[in-house]
Image: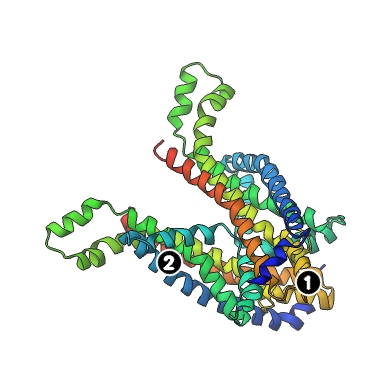
């Protein structure tokens, strides 16, 4: 059976780990969203050259694992003179990975708005900006919300990999405590519980958001 | 730039390729074994039995909400000890990928089976096909078309996730890379950049064609 006193003794480790996971995730996801918006805008506006660069970025980022991206950023790039802290690497890595996922979801949303909607808006005397702000974007947000929510949860889960570059997140704490105390079951139990505490509310909030924003699909 | 010469050292590239082969092998076995598991899970998920339904729901949600790295740790350190298994790191990886791939593929299968309208079954029966014939000749071909693009995407995700095997101590491409870097630390101080760069490219070369196939299938069967 589990030794419950473990929880009392080491709960603070997992709380600290959870803060680190959240810290990396929040900034990583913010960077991913910014990258996603920029990429989706470039692709939708069909800006030459930049558009091809974005296409290459999306393929590279989607088809390589986060762990390899992080090792490259953390161990490889310093050799070229770019020395970053582990936190910075983790955030950039998560942003690099997530940017392409966010861009794809947003682009799918923008493409789902039929051309005739734009034409009608122009006919009603809207200019390009007004059409974008009042007609296209509200519908695009509605369509892309489920994808964006899935990406946020995916990125929080992926952030567990940052333990590999010595960041003390939830995963790292569990590994460390297993090594120190040999209380494998207790550490794993706390690992599961901590991730559930972080991810369940976000998953429920995500479902709520999806329902809140499904007006364009009703 | 002369750090790049590390790649030309005798044995370096063949060893990286051997490491890559281990990665691909783990991924291939996992994908191959998660197909039957996924199909059975998908079939179970379509059943109306409330107990089965509840169990499958909990299984799928648990696998989905846990980070893959956490699942690997649970399998490697927890399950192996609890059931007194002599489960090595590679075995733990394959086990997790089968359970994870099976759950995800199960959900895809469920979606594909449920997306086929009831009238297809009824029409098949009306034409005199038996239950089994209707499934093989009418339901399955349509379900496969809806299933395949998602499954290829899942295979790409499994290949990418095999990179985590190094954190359990499996000697695959990343571990081999680390060994090469450490062995040449003094001769090639900047070798890290190049070795990780090559591993980065290797993953891309393996995963990109899979993504292209998935995308092509999606496009081709989008309007069915």
Q: Do labels 1 and 2 share a chain?
A: no
Q: Which dot marks residue B182?
A: 1
C-alpha span from label 1 to label 2? 37 Å
Chain letter for mark 1, please.
Answer: B
Whether residue A19 is visible here, answered yes or no, is no
Q: Where is residue A66 in the image (x, y as percent from the top left)?
A: 60, 65
Left/right of residue A134 with respect to residue A91 in the rendered view: left
The image quarter containing residue A167 is: bottom right
Q: Are marks 1 and 2 in contact (CB under 8 Å)?
A: no
Residue at left 56%, top 71%?
A93
Q: Is mark 2 on a helix, strand or loop?
A: helix
Q: Position of residue B8 (x, y in %)?
A: 72, 61
Of circles 1 and 2, the one toward us is 1
Q: What element carries label 1?
A: helix
Whether residue B5 is visible here, answered yes or no, is yes
Quadrant of image for the N terminus of chain B: bottom right
Check disc 1: other Cα within 10 Å, few if <14, some if 14-19, many if 20+: some
Check disc 2: other Cα within 10 Å, few if <14, some if 14-19, many if 20+: many
Q: Is residue A25 above or below residue B69?
A: below
Q: Which of A135 and B3 is in front in this view?
A: B3
Q: How is the image coloured?
A: rainbow
Q: Which dot marks residue B221?
A: none
Chain letter for mark 2, please.
Answer: A
Q: Which of B55 and B41 is in front in this view?
A: B41
Q: Position of residue A32 (x, y in %)?
A: 47, 70
Q: Position of residue B158 (x, y in %)?
A: 64, 53
Name the residue tied to disc 2: A36
């Amino acid at each position: 059976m589990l030794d419950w006193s473990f929880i009392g003794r080491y709960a603070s480790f997992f709380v600290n780990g959870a803060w680190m996971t959240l810290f990396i995730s929040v900034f990583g996801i913010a960077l991913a969203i910014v990258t996603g918006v920029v990429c989706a805008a470039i692709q939708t506006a069909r800006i030459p050259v930049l558009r091809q660069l974005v296409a290459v970025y999306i393929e590279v980022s989607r088809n390589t694992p986060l762990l390899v991206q992080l090792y490259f950023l953390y161990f490889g790039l310093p050799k070229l003179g770019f020395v970053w802290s582990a936190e910075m690497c983790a955030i950039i890595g998560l942003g690099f990975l997530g940017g392409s996922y966010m861009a794809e979801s947003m682009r799918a949303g923008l493409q789902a708005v039929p051309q005739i909607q734009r034409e009608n808006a122009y006919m009603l005397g809207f200019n390009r900006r007004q059409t974008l702000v009042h007609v296209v974007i509200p519908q695009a947000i509605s369509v892309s919300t489920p994808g964006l929510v899935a990406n946020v949860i995916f990125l929080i889960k992926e952030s567990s990999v940052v333990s590999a570059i010595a960041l003390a997140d939830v995963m790292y704490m569990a590994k460390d405590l297993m090594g120190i105390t040999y209380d494998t079951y207790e550490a794993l139990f706390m690992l599961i519980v901590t991730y559930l505490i972080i991810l369940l509310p976000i998953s429920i909030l995500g479902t709520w958001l999806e329902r809140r924003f499904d007006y364009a699909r009703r | 730039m002369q750090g790049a010469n590390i790649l030309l050292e005798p044995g370096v590239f063949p060893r990286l390729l051997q490491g890559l082969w281990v990665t691909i092998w783990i991924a291939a076995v996992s994908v191959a074994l998660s197909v039957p598991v996924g199909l059975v899970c998908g079939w179970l998920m379509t059943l109306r039995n409330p107990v089965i339904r509840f169990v499958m729901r909990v299984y799928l949600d648990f696998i989905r909400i846990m980070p893959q790295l956490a699942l690997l740790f649970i399998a490697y350190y927890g399950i192996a000890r609890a059931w007194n298994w002599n489960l090595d790191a590679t075995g733990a990886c394959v086990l997790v990928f089968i359970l994870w791939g099976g759950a995800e593929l199960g959900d895809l299968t469920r979606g594909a089976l449920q997306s086929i309208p009831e009238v297809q079954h009824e029409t098949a029966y009306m034409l005199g096909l038996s239950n089994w014939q209707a499934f093989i000749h009418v339901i399955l071909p349509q379900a496969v078309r809806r299933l395949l693009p998602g499954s290829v995407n899942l295979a790409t995700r499994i290949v990418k996730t095999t990179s985590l095997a190094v954190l359990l101590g499996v000697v695959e491409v990343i571990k081999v890379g680390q060994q090469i870097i450490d062995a040449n630390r003094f001769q090639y101080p900047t070798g890290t950049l190049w070795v990780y760069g090559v591993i980065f490219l290797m993953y891309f070369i393996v995963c990109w064609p899979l993504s292209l196939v998935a995308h092509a299938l999606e496009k081709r069967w989008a309007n069915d």
